Structure formats: structure tokens, C-alpha cells
Amino acid sequence: MIDNTRLYLKLIKISIMAQLQYKTSFLLLTIGNFLLTFMDFVGIVFLFQRFGSLKGWKLEELALLYGIIHMSFAVSEAYARGFDIFDRLVRSGNFDRILIRPRSLILQILGIDFQLMRWGRFLQGFVVLVYALNHLEISLNIFRLLFLVSSIISGALIFSGIIILQATLSFWSVQSIEIVNSFSYGGVELASYPLSIYPKIFREIFIFFIPIAFINYFPGLALLGKENLLGIPSFLSYFSPLIGLIFFYICCKIWYLGVRHYSSTGS
């Protein structure tokens, strides 16, 4: 395990150093990533200036949800890029080369590419989160701070699990199935707003099947002390970080099931 971790950290270091070889390009990409995603929140601000609230949610409360979901997705985008391009490894036959190495398959693939420019999305999510915390009456004690941080990490694991599920489909389709993006990129957009505003079918999908609601909605309810209107016991909000670990573990098991059925593309 120590050797696998050391190899992974070395691969990440190589990836970061390669990106920093072109500092101007890296800086522009990071700024562009920040501005592009930040414009989404600007649109939300204009929406609230026009209507005032959204089904009982104030702008500051929605900003809390927004900051958590975007920080989580930024972390996932950064370190799970290897699985995002996994279909290319399968088509080119490069996955065969990874299979013969006596190291962890998942860590090898995670180490293929580390998208440092995703720091732009993470930063804008952090700025919005700080804005929310400064305008809300939330006393951030150690417990709540740890709960908030663990929810962001758990959210990154959930999004990573979704990306891994998408990569798993490549074993049978040899192509990345773009419909899965509706649960990753689409999930970010959906979870930028309170889950309670959506029809019942969407709420059930994002609670019981793809647990995006446990990234920011349920933790947000717990931090804000708002009533849960979805019929889910309130105490389950505090188990949100655990949901991320469980979901990621299940997705990894499904991916290894695909590995056992992999027979190469013949490239």
C-alpha cells in the first residue's frame, strides 16, 4: 500500500510539473475556469434580485449549497481525470499496459492526469461559500467545520464514483457514454439549487440511486437548521459523509467487475 501511494504521489507530481511548464497558459486556464463557473452564480444573484427567494430559500442559503457542490466537483475533476478519459485507454490498448504492472489499477489511472487548472472552479466555490457563511447565522464550531469539510470530501467521492461508473461502461461500449454526464456535470447544475424544488422522480433519483443530495442539500439543512420537507429523517443528514465513502466503494467494486470481464480491444 505504501509503494502504491508513493507511486501515485510521484505520478501526480509529474503531472503538476508538466502543467507548470507553461505558466502563462496554466494561469489563463485557471482564471478562465474561475470566471466561467462564477458567471453561473452571477446568474443566480440576478434571479434572486428579481424574485427575492426560491421556495423559502434566501440567496445566502442557496450560496451555501452552491459553494459546497462546486468545491466537491472541482476536487473530483482534478484528481479523477484519468477515469474521465478511460475510454481512450481502452480504445488505444494502453489499459493492457497498465494491467501488467504490479501496482494498484485505480491509483495508476488516477495518476494519469491531475487537472491543476480545476483550482479555478474550487476557488470560486470557496469564495461563494465564504460569502454564505459570512451572511448566515451559523456558528462554525469544530464539529460543524469538520462536518462541512467532510461533506465536501464526500461529495468529491460521489462525483468520482459517477465518473468511475462512466468509465466502467467503456469495457462493453469501448466509448464513453455521454448520458452519464447528466449525473456529473448535470448533477452540479441541479444541486446548485435546493432539491425540494424538483419533481418527486428527480428527488428520488438523486437521493436513493445517485446520492447527490447527500453532497450539499442534506448537509446544508443540518448546518442551517432548516426543516427537511422530503420525508427523510433529519438525523440522516449527519451521515452524509459516510454515504460518499459507501457510494465510492460500490462504484470501485463495479469497475473491478468490468476489469474481470475485459478482453482487450485488439489494438
Image (spheres, rainbow, N blue to C red):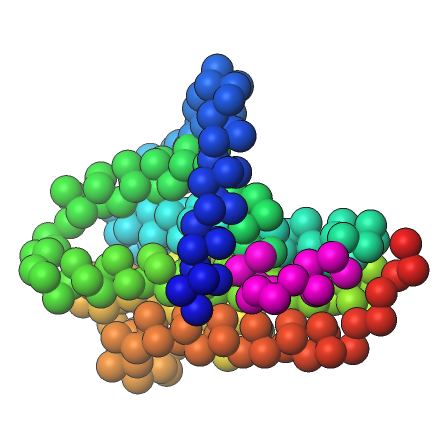
Q: Is residue 253 above or below residue 48?
A: below
Q: Would residue 47 be seen by someone viewing this image from the given angle?
A: no
* Residue 205 coordinates in the image, percent (x, y): 56, 73
Quick one: 255 or 209, which is closer to the camera?
Answer: 255
Residue 32 lies in the magenta stretch:
no
- Residue 126 visible? The answer is yes
Total numbered badges shown on the rendered structure: 0
Q: Which residues are magenta?
A: 96-108
The picture places residue 161, in percent across and down from the top left corner, at 54, 66
Q: Say which of 64 and 112 sits in front.
A: 112
Residue 99 is situated, as x and y percent measured from the top left of the image, at 70, 64
Relative horizontal placement of residue 5, taking residue 257 as reference (left or right): left
Between 35 and 234, which is closer to the camera in this rendering? 35
Residue at the image position 76 percent from the left and 53 percent from the top: 94
* Magenta stretch: helix, strand or loop mostly: helix
The single residue placed furthest to the right in the displayed view is 266
Point out residue 239 in the picture as x, y percentages from the top left corner. 30, 77
Residue at (61%, 66%) from the top-left corner? 102
